Image (spheres, rainbow, N blue to C red):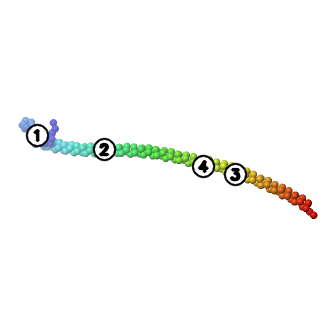
């Protein structure tokens, strides 16, 4: 049975003349108990309101905590995905650079081989030119020698002709 301050104040007792209590004292005591119970009930209501407010705040804080955890998890996932994408992009850039470097290196090797071939061709042409030039010079030397021999033969003939023609 739950008593309210009003129940306590309105409680009536029968009066007996044999060994009974002083009605004014009983009434004063009941009033003080009613005031005390009234204070306790008010305090209980205040505590219940305070508890309700604290529960509401706790619920809000839990919701915020949940939101923050979700945000943190999302941020971590985004960071991991960005890192994975950056690694993929870096690998792609490195492989593209390697392919480009390989292509440049191949072109350089091909150019070097072509230059060596050109040098070899120029040396061959030089050798052929030297041989032709030597052959031409030797031919002209032979012609000069032949001409000198002819001139010597002509001079010899002329001296013989002069000898016969001298009066």
For the residues labelled 3 and 2, the Cα–Cα distance comes to: 92 Å
Q: Name the residue under label 1.
A: 11
Looking at marks 4 and 2 on the same chain, the residue that comes earlier in the sequence is marked by 2
What residue occupies the far left of the structure in this picture?
A: 17
**Front: mark 3 or 2:** 3
In the picture, measured across the screen, residue 78 lies left or right of residue 158, that is left
Question: In the structure shown, which secondary structural element does the residue marked by tag 2 occupy?
Answer: helix
Q: Name the residue under label 4.
A: 111
- In this rendering, the answer to whether 166 lies above or below 40 is below
For the residues labelled 4 and 2, the Cα–Cα distance comes to: 70 Å
Which residue lies at the image location 81% right of the left edge and 56% below the top edge? 147
For the residues labelled 1 and 4, the Cα–Cα distance comes to: 120 Å
Which residue lies at the image location 46% right of the left edge and 44% below the top edge? 88
State if disc 4 and disc 1 touch (CB < 8 Å).
no
**Front: mark 1 or 2:** 2
Looking at marks 3 and 2 on the same chain, the residue that comes earlier in the sequence is marked by 2
Q: Say which of 111 and 12 sits in front.
A: 111
Question: In the structure shown, which secondary structural element does the residue marked by tag 1 occupy?
Answer: loop
Q: Mark 2 points at which residue?
A: 63
Q: Mark 3 points at which residue?
A: 126
Q: Say which of 19 and 161 sits in front.
A: 161
For the residues labelled 1 and 2, the Cα–Cα distance comes to: 50 Å
Question: In the structure shown, which secondary structural element does the residue marked by tag 4 occupy?
Answer: helix
């Amino acid at each position: 049975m739950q008593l309210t301050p009003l129940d306590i104040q309105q409680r009536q007792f029968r009066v007996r003349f044999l060994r009974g209590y002083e009605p004014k004292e009983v009434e004063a005591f009941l009033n003080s108990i009613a005031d005390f119970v009234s204070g306790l009930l008010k305090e209980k209501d205040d505590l219940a309101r305070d508890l309700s407010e604290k529960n509401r705040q706790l619920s809000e804080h839990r919701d915020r905590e949940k939101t923050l955890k979700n945000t943190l998890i999302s941020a971590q996932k985004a960071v991991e995905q960005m890192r994975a994408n950056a690694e993929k992009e870096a690998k792609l850039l490195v492989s593209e650079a390697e392919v480009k470097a390989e292509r440049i290196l191949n072109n350089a090797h091909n150019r070097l081989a072509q230059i060596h071939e050109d040098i070899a061709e120029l040396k061959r042409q030089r050798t052929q030119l030297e041989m032709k030039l030597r052959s031409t010079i030797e031919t002209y030397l032979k012609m000069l020698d032949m001409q000198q021999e002819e001139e010597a033969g002509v001079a010899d003939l002329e001296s013989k002709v002069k000898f016969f023609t001298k009066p």
